[in-house]
Every structure is written in C-alpha cells, then in structure tokens.
Image (tube, helix red, strand yellow):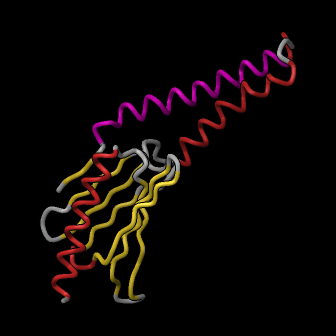
C-alpha cells in the first residue's frame, strides 16, 4: 500500500508563506503603532503575539509531507518539511519482518507515529514520524496496513 500527502505540498507552502507574511505585517503594524499612531496602547502587542503564536503552532505540528510504502518485502517511511532548513528529512526503509509494533499518539492537533522495529545491537529501536497533516482516512489506512504487517509477523513467530 502506498500513502502520501505530497500532492498537498502547494497548499502547505501557501499557508506557511501566508503565516510568515502575516507575521511580517504584524511586526510592521506594531512598529507603526508604537512610534507613529499610539492608538491601541498595550493591545498593540497582540499585533506581534498572535502571528508569532500561529507560526510556532505550525512549527510544532511537525513535518508536512509523509510518505509510506509497504509494497514488496520492505516498509519505507519518508517524513519531510516544506521548508528544508527547519527540520532534517527522515527516510527509513527496513524489511517487514522487523516491525514489532506501532503506536499513534493524538494530542489536540499533533499526531505522531511511533514504530518499534527489531535491531541486532539494542534489541529494538523506536522510530518517530510526524503525521499531523494526514487526514483521518489516511491515518486509518495507515493503521490498517501496519496492523496487517504486525499480524503477519506475529503469525510467523507462532
């Protein structure tokens, strides 16, 4: 099964650009308010605070693009951000038989996928992927596919 939200890159790019422009306009409006108009008083800090909070929330939500491929004998996960310098892209590929378990954590607007794989050196390794930008249907498809692999692995062990 292949799962990807790469086709939404232009939407995420537009929203990120809009947030940064909103932040720059907010800083400009704050500077004009403080040194020229002085109408709002203390509320002028909201001109900077609200856009800054939105940018931070966008950053905390995680990497925008998630790709998953379970075709063949290997699982391939890719997780990258639209803005390359914000976060290093993740790319992992390993055989299906190494998948031990997975867990999806959903806290407010942040979703994370934790995949536990078997490892020669330490016994098991946990890989973390940010899936906040996937739709509910895409998350359900991902759960279904990973459950199928875990179930097949457990049957082989028994």
Q: Nearer the viewer, residue 80 or 153?
A: 153
Q: Which residues are magenta?
A: 6-34
Q: Nearer the viewer, residue 121 or 61?
A: 61
Taking the image as shown, residue 45 lies to the left or right of residue 141, namely right
Residue 119 location (% of width, % of height): 35, 84
Residue at the extreme left: 72
Query: Which quadrant is the C terminus positioned in?
Result: bottom left
Taking the image as shown, residue 30 lies to the left or right of residue 62, namely right
Q: Is residue 33 magenta?
A: yes
Residue at (37% x, 54% y) in the render: 79
Residue at (33% x, 74% y) in the render: 101
Q: Is residue 25 above or below residue 112?
A: above
Residue at (22% x, 81% y) in the render: 154
Q: Nearer the viewer, residue 133 or 109?
A: 109
Taking the image as shown, residue 23 lies to the left or right of residue 152, namely right
Query: Which quadrant is the N terminus positioned in?
Result: bottom left
Q: Quadrant of residue 93?
A: bottom left
Q: Is residue 101 above or below residue 10?
A: below
Residue 12 location (% of width, % of height): 41, 35
Q: Is residue 101 above or below residue 69?
A: below
Q: Quadrant of residue 35?
A: top right
Q: Quadrant of residue 7?
A: top left
Residue 75 location (% of width, % of height): 23, 66
Q: Nearer the viewer, residue 124 or 24?
A: 124
> Secondary structure of the magenta portion, mostly?
helix
Q: Is residue 11 magenta?
A: yes
Q: How many marks?
A: 0
Residue at (41% x, 66% y) in the render: 114
Residue 55 location (% of width, % of height): 59, 37
């Amino acid at each position: 099964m292949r799962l990807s939200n790469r086709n939404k890159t232009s939407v995420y790019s537009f929203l990120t650009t809009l947030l940064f422009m909103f932040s720059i306009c907010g800083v400009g409006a704050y500077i004009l308010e403080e040194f020229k108009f002085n109408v709002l008083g203390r509320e002028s800090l909201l001109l900077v605070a609200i856009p800054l909070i939105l940018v931070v929330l966008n950053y905390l939500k995680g990497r925008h693009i998630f790709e998953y491929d379970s075709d063949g004998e290997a699982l391939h996960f890719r997780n990258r951000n639209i803005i390359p310098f914000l976060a290093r892209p993740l790319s992992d590929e390993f055989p299906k038989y190494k998948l031990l378990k997975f867990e999806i954590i959903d806290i407010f607007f942040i979703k994370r996928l934790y995949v536990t794989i078997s490892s020669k050196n330490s016994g098991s390794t946990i890989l973390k992927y940010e899936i906040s930008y996937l739709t509910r249907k895409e998350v359900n498809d991902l759960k279904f596919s990973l459950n199928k692999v875990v179930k097949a692995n457990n049957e082989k062990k028994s």
